[in-house]
């Protein structure tokens, strides 16, 4: 089946703004656990409404264009999908293709689990909170838009691999759906983008997870942080200090960052500025 003229116009228009919207193209990773960026048209018109799977998705202004950004769960089946766009009461369908992506599966030898000290704030793992965090991902708030790219919450080395799974004792684990960083003590943990502190989630005796609503279904869960410097309801700018890791005898700290976009946990590092 051939491509119609309208589709060719959209394709040509998409690539004609490449020089001016490079960061938008950098956000386009149509794989399970990734993100899809669609340029909807000039921002000189009212902001359109875009929906994917019946859910409204983030639409923000970038380089004089309206851009829709949506997240794909890790269990997304590769294939063609559609996004409905309503602009000035006129509806149209945009489509995109999710590409296959193979995440690593690691064989892990069974070992006697050592008791972790309190200097490791990632005990228990952030992934254990998924059942509690999942209902919170329905949070939606309107706003002026989200500024991309995001910034990682700490300056540190990422120590896990998003999407990876482990096989231990013949049992396959759930895929990793967050980023975890190792950083030095006395480090500042910062907001990835502007937003509002929606909630502080108690995390055992390890501290609190800061839940930030960046607007239009983009949410960050960062922590746990033993010392939090923000309050619920506070509006934060990009790079605002959320907390400081205390000085201690430990050589390093671990900080997790889980991102939900239209209720899908995605790889947050795909939204971070490339260096």
Image (spheres, helix red, strand yellow):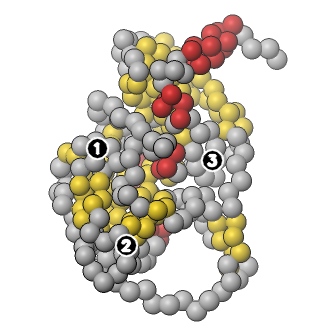
Q: Position of residue 266 (x, y in %)?
A: 52, 50
What residue lies at 69% left-to-right and 70% top-to-bottom?
Answer: 106
Which of the 4 image quadrants contains residue 144?
A: top left
Question: In the image, 13: left or right of 187?
Answer: right
Question: In this rendering, does residue 195 appear at all?
Answer: no
Which residue position holds label 3?
32
Figure label count? 3
| Mark 3 and mark 2 residues within 8 Å of each other at the beta carbon | no
Q: Residue 127's x, y, as percent?
A: 48, 67
Q: How many angstroms separate mark 2 from mark 1 (CA)? A: 22 Å
- Element assignment for label 1: loop
Q: Which residue is mark 2?
A: 253
Give the structural element (helix, strand or loop) at label 2: strand
Do the CB atoms of the residues marked 3 and 1 lie less than 8 Å apart? Answer: no
- Quadrant occupied by the N terminus: top right
Task: Compare marks 2 and 1 and give the one earlier in the sequence.
Answer: 1
Residue in the picture at 40% in, 25% down:
62
| Above or below, 265 relative to 127 | above
For marks 3 and 1, the one nearer the N-term is: 3
Residue closer to the observer: 232 or 161: 161
Structural crowding at the residue carrying mark 1, measured as other residues with C-alpha within 10 Å and reported as few (<14), some (14–19) or many (≥20)? some
Mark sitting on residue 238: 1
**123 lies above or below 16:** below
SS class of the residue under badge 3? loop
């Amino acid at each position: 089946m051939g491509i119609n003229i309208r589709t060719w116009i959209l394709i040509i228009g998409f690539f004609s703004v490449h020089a001016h919207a490079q960061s938008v193209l950098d956000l386009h990773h149509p794989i399970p656990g990734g993100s899809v960026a669609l340029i909807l048209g000039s921002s000189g018109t009212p902001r359109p409404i875009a929906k994917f799977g019946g859910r409204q998705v983030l639409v923000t202004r970038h380089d004089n264009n309206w851009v829709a950004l949506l997240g794909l769960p890790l269990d997304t089946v590769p294939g063609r999908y559609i996004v409905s766009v309503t602009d000035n009461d006129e509806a149209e369908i945009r489509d995109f293709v999710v590409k296959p992506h193979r995440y690593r599966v690691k064989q892990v030898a069974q070992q006697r689990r050592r008791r972790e000290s309190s200097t490791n704030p990632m005990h228990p793992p952030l992934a254990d909170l998924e059942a509690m965090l999942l209902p919170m991902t329905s949070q939606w708030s309107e706003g002026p838009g989200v500024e991309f790219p995001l910034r990682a919450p700490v300056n540190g080395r990422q120590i896990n691999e998003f999407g990876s799974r482990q096989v231990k004792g013949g049992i396959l684990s759930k895929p990793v759906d967050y980023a975890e960083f190792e950083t030095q003590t006395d480090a500042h943990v910062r907001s990835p983008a502007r937003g509002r502190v929606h909630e502080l989630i108690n995390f055992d005796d390890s501290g609190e997870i800061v839940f930030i609503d960046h607007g239009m279904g983009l949410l960050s869960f960062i922590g746990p942080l033993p010392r939090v410097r923000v309050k619920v309801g506070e509006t934060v700018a990009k790079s605002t200090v959320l907390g400081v890791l205390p000085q201690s005898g430990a050589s390093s700290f671990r900080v997790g960052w889980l991102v939900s976009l239209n209720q899908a946990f995605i790889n947050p590092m795909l939204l971070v500025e490339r260096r």
